[in-house]
Image: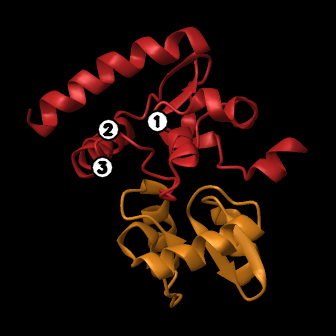
Amino acid sequence: MYTLSTCPWCRKTKNFFAGHNIPFDYIDYDLADASTQDRIIEELDAHGATGFPYVKIDNEIVYGYNPSRYAELLGL
Amino acid sequence: MNVESRKKALHYFFGKIVDPMGYKFTPDQELVDFLLEQEVILEQKHGIPFCPCQGLRHDRSRDMKIVCPCIPFHRKHFDIMKRCWCGLYVHKDVTDPDSLPQLPYSEADHE
């Protein structure tokens, strides 16, 4: 998932996955180096996303904090 | 100026700006406190209180659209959600901010 260290919804997203013992990788966009930021922005733009959190579950993209969608995709 | 007094200043200043737009601070006081604190940190780092939930793109024309309060630049999207992206502001008639999800603009458009 792509997140921001300053965003409370990004923290809620991480907590959702951690709370359900689901391992996840994340990059805090604002703390990343320039080339990583460029790559992330390219991906977000490709999906019309302008904000964070931006979560990828298998091939599904969930943009914005959406716990019910996470649960649905994860089969919880 | 320390963080707490700058938060108070931003709260006073932003409240006056969003009121005529039909928005108010979210009733979730803890969220207001946290978001304003993040904005003071962003202001100290970048010189401008940017939105804590939309990343800087180092493209001035785009980054200016996420200067808080960024409502005017995302009016249609936020009006559909009845909140701004980070949730700091909600429509004046909102009493239960937790019931307002973050909707991607594409999805919000079809609500």
Report the side of B65 relative to A71 (left or right).
Answer: left
Which quadrant is the C terminus of chain B positioned in?
top right
**Disc on the earlier residue, 1 or 2:** 2
Q: Colour of chain B?
A: red
Residue picked out by circle 1? B88
- The answer to which of A50 and B4 lies nearer the viewer is A50
Q: Nearer the viewer, mark 3 or mark 2?
A: 3
Mark 3 closeness class: few <14, some 14–19, many ≥20 residues within 10 Å: few
Q: Do tags 1 and 2 sit on the same chain? A: yes
Q: Where is mark 3, residue-wise? A: B46
**Which secondary structure, mark 1?**
loop
Q: CA distance from mark 3 to mark 1?
A: 20 Å
Nearest the eye: A47 or A37: A37
Give the distance between the C-alpha atoms of the residues marked 1 and 2, in whole angstroms: 8 Å
- What number is the disc on residue B36? 2
Q: Characterize the local packing of mark 2: few (<14), some (14-19) or many (20 or more) Cα atoms within 10 angstroms.
A: many
Is mark 1 in CB contact (under 8 Å) with mark 2?
yes
Give percent across and percent down for residue B96.
57, 32
First along the sequence among labels 3 and 1: 3
Q: Chain of mark 2?
A: B
Confirm whether residue B6 shows in the render: yes
- Which of the chains is orange? A
What amino acid type should be assigned to the residue bearing mark 3? Answer: His
Q: Which residue is the extreme one toward the front?
A: B60
**Marks 3 and 2 belong to one chain:** yes
